[in-house]
């Protein structure tokens, strides 16, 4: 059965889009008071219940070059946009979990926009002195951010006009749409120097690697549980700081 129309109001918080206080659509399993997760299942086509779609548009461009003077380069750019739409399906079957989203997720359309990744790798051996120079680079889209609000069951019940389905005193609800807020973009440069020593048939590489050359501190993962005045979006891991590594390799 279709979900009952209702809305919840997001908490006011300057960290939320627009400062919070906006309406959250009520397309959630909690509206289905009689739904029993242990009931028998029927497998059928999604088109029988409104259908769903997943559409990708993008392009991938890679280049690989090897010059006569010992210069090598590889790099590329990958950009694309994936739009997932299950609104028609969830209008009829709000208890169905699609595209990995929680049944309590109020957003049935995921359109994060174009996501771009850039990579590059170059190396060059300086002739006569046998010194190897290498550089790698990557630029990745930041992590998609969530704000999972443990809404009081009493507030959901009041908005719904009848008891809500839930376990305990709270129900987890996403306050921001997928792709609406992103974390730090991750840019990292790594550099390598190596000297080649030759002795008869033996060749030795002695190298120095510098990781995260610019000492970037981009956040990789965040606390995504929202609470007013809480630690929402507090970093739980960051890019490894700049460090050095000495190495040696002997070929014979």
Image: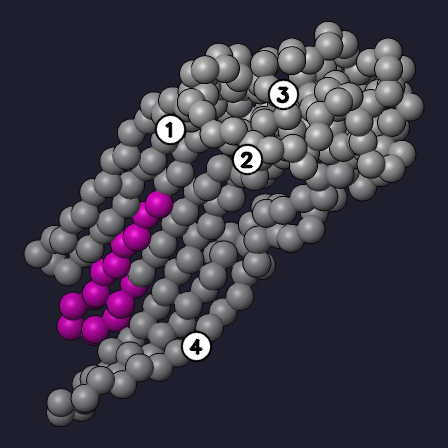
How is the structure coloured here?
one colour
Q: Is residue 201 left or right of residue 238?
A: left
Tell me the SS state at disc 1.
strand
Q: Tell me the residue that label 1 is attached to.
A: 80
Q: Which mark is residue 94?
A: 3
N-terminal of the pair, mark 3 or mark 4, is 3
N-terminal of the pair, mark 4 or mark 2, is 2
Q: Which mark is residue 7?
A: none
Disc 4 + disc 1, Cβ < 8 Å: no
Q: CA distance from mark 3 to mark 4?
A: 57 Å
Residue 223, position in %: x, y?
72, 43
Q: Tell me the residue that label 4 is attached to.
A: 246
Work out whether residue 120 or residue 232 is closer to the camera in this orientation and state it: 232
Work out whether residue 98 or residue 80 is closer to the camera in this orientation and state it: 98
**Does the image show residue 83?**
no
Q: Tell me the residue that label 2 is attached to.
A: 100
> Quadrant of the rendered structure where residue 123 is?
bottom left
Disc 1 + disc 3, Cβ < 8 Å: no
Instruction: Quadrant for the N terminus, please.
Output: top right
Residue 252, position in %: x, y?
19, 88
Q: What's drawn in magenta, residue-wise?
A: 119-133
Q: CA distance from mark 3 to mark 2?
A: 14 Å
* Nearer mark to the viewer, of 3 and 2: 3
Q: CA distance from mark 1 to mark 2?
A: 20 Å
Disc 1 + disc 2, Cβ < 8 Å: no
């Amino acid at each position: 059965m279709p979900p009952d129309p209702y809305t919840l109001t997001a908490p006011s918080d300057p960290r939320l889009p627009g400062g919070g206080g906006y309406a959250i659509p009520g397309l959630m399993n909690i509206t289905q008071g009689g739904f029993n997760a242990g009931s028998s299942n029927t497998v059928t086509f999604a088109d029988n219940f409104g259908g769903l779609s997943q559409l990708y548009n993008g392009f991938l461009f890679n280049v690989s070059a090897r010059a006569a003077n010992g210069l090598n380069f590889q790099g590329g750019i990958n950009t694309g946009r994936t739009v997932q739409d299950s609104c028609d399906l969830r209008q009829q079957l709000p208890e169905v979990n699609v595209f990995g989203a929680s049944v309590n997720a109020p957003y049935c359309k995921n359109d994060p926009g174009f996501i771009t990744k850039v990579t590059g790798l170059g190396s060059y051996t300086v002739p006569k002195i046998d010194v190897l120079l290498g550089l790698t680079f990557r630029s990745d889209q930041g992590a998609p951010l969530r704000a999972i609000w443990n809404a009081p069951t009493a507030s959901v019940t009041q908005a719904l006009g009848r008891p809500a389905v839930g376990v305990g005193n709270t129900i987890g609800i996403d306050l921001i749409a997928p792709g609406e807020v992103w974390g730090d973009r991750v840019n990292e440069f790594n550099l390598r120097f190596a000297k080649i020593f030759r002795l008869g048939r033996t060749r030795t590489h002695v190298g120095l690697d510098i990781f995260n050359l610019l000492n970037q501190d981009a956040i990789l993962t965040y606390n995504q549980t929202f609470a007013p005045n809480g630690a929402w979006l507090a970093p739980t891991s960051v890019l490894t700081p700049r460090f050095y590594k000495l190495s040696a390799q002997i070929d014979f």
